[in-house]
Image (cartoon, helix red, strand yellow):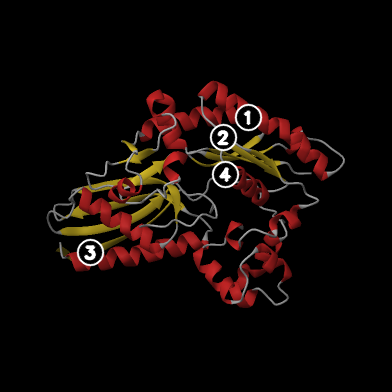
Amino acid sequence: MRVIAHLDLDACFASIEQRDNPALRGKPVIVGAPPTQRGVVAACSYEARKFGVRSAMPSVTAGRLCPDAVFVRPRMEVYRTESRLVMRLIAESGGVVEQTSIDEAYVDFSELCPAEDQDSALLKGLPLGRFLKERIRSERQLAATVGIGSNKLLAKIGSDKAKPDGLMVIPESGKAEFLRPFPVRVLFGVGKATEVALARAGVETVADLQDYAGDLRALVGSFGPKLRRFAFGDDDRPLELGEDIRSISEEETFLRDTEDRKVLRTSLRTMAANIAERLKRHQLTAHTVQVKIRYGDFSTLTRQISVEDPLSEPADIYRLGCFLLGRERLVCRPLRLIGLGVSSLREPTGKQLTLL
């Protein structure tokens, strides 16, 4: 029997800021550049999300949606240090850990939960999940949500649905029925393009997938058989404990140095499309976008920005790349090379990022 937990720190960046500055608690906090400056939202608290604020949104738009928001500059090194401390606490639980991002991890508690049947084993995982939540709260003063299931798919859906500060076990005996009401995008690997392809065939919920009598390969290609298994809550993916893909990037070296904006934009769009396609192929999303430029004298600069919500669409990646070039005024002279990349890769959450 497998007992897999998925732990997610709630509104991680903003929660750390509220913890470190008690005056921010209970207020809508936006981590990013202030609305009076050119910038984007890196993360936001739940209080700000109620107003429609989301990661990667222009700060000026976020300021209009939430006029009372408190804007705080990102402190990425603080967030990374906090991540290491939390992951150490998780590892001390005795489970096998796969860290998937700065604020998320899977924990395999199977060896700690011996039982005669799967549902009994999952119930034994409940106090372990509660222990993790309580320890993170007492030692790091942060809230975490934990989902528990027989596989990664169910554990992740459980943590997504229990947010914020929740704990959910999805029983094995009722997993297919539990999934039926949800939109298809909750399933691993279903991004915007797949969701649209399924909707054209009238498949919008997991129930529609479970009841679909045709061959799903006609709608989503080779992903069809796996998608059907996911629809019934079946997932045999193991925890990834070895080396994995850390980043995806593209570069273009020009025949002649150029600062022509049209040429540079065309290059960025092509690279963003290629990167998005590779993300889709590996069933990943990104949380960091990086640009790289090289001038005629071979001096090279890189700049990056991280956001809390997942990126997978070419338009989003392209837009943040353009933002970095403009904010840092990197095209101040002709470029020999331009590059675009993404990192902080993780599995899709089912959320679709909307840029206003």
Q: Is residue 249 left or right of residue 187?
A: left
> In the rendered structure, are the residues bearing label 1 and label 2 in contact, judged by CB atoms less than 8 Å apart?
yes
- Residue placed under numbered mark 4 in the picture: 242
Relative to residue 100, is residue 72 drawn left or right?
left
Rendered image quadrant of residue 232: bottom right
Residue 21: x %, y % from top left: 38, 25
Q: Please state, as top left, top right, bottom left or bottom right, where the C terminus lies in the image.
A: bottom left
Q: Alpha carbon of mark 1 to alpha carbon of mark 4: how far?
A: 24 Å
According to the picture, the residue beneath numbered tag 3 turns out to be: 264
Front position in the image: 67 or 17: 67
Q: Residue at x 25, y 62 (%)?
A: 253
Contact? badges 1 and 4 (CB < 8 Å): no
Q: Residue at x 36, y 54 (%)?
A: 341
- Residue holding disc 1: 132
> Could you tell which of marks 1 and 3 lies nearer the N-terminus?
1
Residue type at mark 4 is: Gly
Where residue 267 sits, quadrant-wise, is: bottom left
Please, what secondary structure does the residue beneath circle 2 have? strand
Percent from the top left, x then y, of residue 277?
45, 65
What's the distance in space between the residues labelled 1 and 3, CA to CA?
A: 48 Å
- For badge 3, the amino acid type reads Leu
CA–CA distance in space, label 1 to label 2: 8 Å
Circle 3 SS class:
helix
Q: Nearer the viewer, mark 1 or mark 3?
A: 1
**Number of other residues with Cα within 10 Å of mark 1, as a class: few under 14, some 14 to 19, many 20 or more:** many
The amino acid sitting under disc 2 is Ala
Q: Residue 126: x, y in percent?
A: 72, 34
Which residue bears the numbered disc 2? 144
